[in-house]
Image (spheres, rainbow, N blue to C red):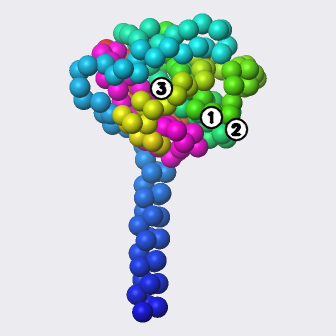
Amino acid sequence: MPLRSSTCIALAVLFLTGLVSSACSASPTAAAASTTTAKPDWFNIKMTDVRTGQSFTVNDYAGKVVLVETMATWCITCIEQQVEVKKLEGQISNPKDLAVISLDTDLNEDAATLKEYANSYGFDWHFAISPLEMDRALGNLYSSAFMNPPLAPMLFVDRKGSVYSLPFGAVKKATALQDTLAPHLAQ
């Protein structure tokens, strides 16, 4: 009997190791997260940019490519990802075609903390406290992993309103993001 238990444990460890290594080595190739032509309801959820105090929705950027990440101010992976997004903005030929939205999903963080965070790193795109309604929509439609900031969760919306999820588990480098977004920015 002890041999059978240790064999099961060993197989479980191998399986989990395989899952983790495949998630961490995934390239930022986009996978379609939505195949319907109707735009998701979360495109209409009002958010407030903590840096400017202005309200916005994803629909406000119809016709642009919209890069959305969920994050928290305590998340080291998030900072690393945001540094790559800042580099991306400098690499694309027409940055006005790309809207970036960082959504803080930590219920213990507030607008003042998030504003200080964004300003201290010099990030100049939209930062908002994610409304619970948005958290639910992203988690239910795409993956609950969007509520786990250290997984570097990101998705993007193309110019036509289709949603594409990017791989979880690793920071997406600016050049890889550019390669993924370029065909959509060129449309």
Label 2 vs label 3: CA separation?
A: 22 Å
Contact check, label 3 and label 1, Cβ < 8 Å: no
| Quarter location, residue 102 | top right
Total count of labels: 3
**Reading the chain from its start, which is encountered first: label 2 or label 1?**
2
Kind of residue indicated by mark 1: Asp
Quarter the C terminus occupies = top left
On residue 74, the disc is: 2
Nearest-to-viewer mark from 2 and 3: 3
Helix, strand or loop for disc 3: helix
Which of marks 3 and 2 precedes in the sequence?
2
Vertical placement of residue 125 versus 117, above or below = above
- Residue 176 appears anywhere in the view: no
CB under 8 Å between discs 2 and 1: yes
SS at badge 1: loop
Neighbor class of circle 2 (other Cα within 10 Å; few <14, some 14-19, many 20+) is: few
- Kindly identify the residue that appears in the image at 61 percent across and 14 percent down: 49
| Foreground: disc 3 or disc 1 | 3
Q: Which residue corresponds to mark 3?
A: 133
The region drawn magenta spans 146-171
Query: Which residue is denoted by mark 1 in the rendering?
Result: 106
- The spot of residue 160 in percent (x, y) is 30, 16
Please determine whether, in this image, residue 134 is positioned above or below residue 187: below
Residue at (36%, 34%) from the top-left corner?
141
Name the one closer to the observer, 8 or 119. Answer: 8
Question: Is tag 3's residue or tag 1's residue first in the polypeptide sequence?
Answer: 1
Answer above or below: position of 133 versus 2.
above
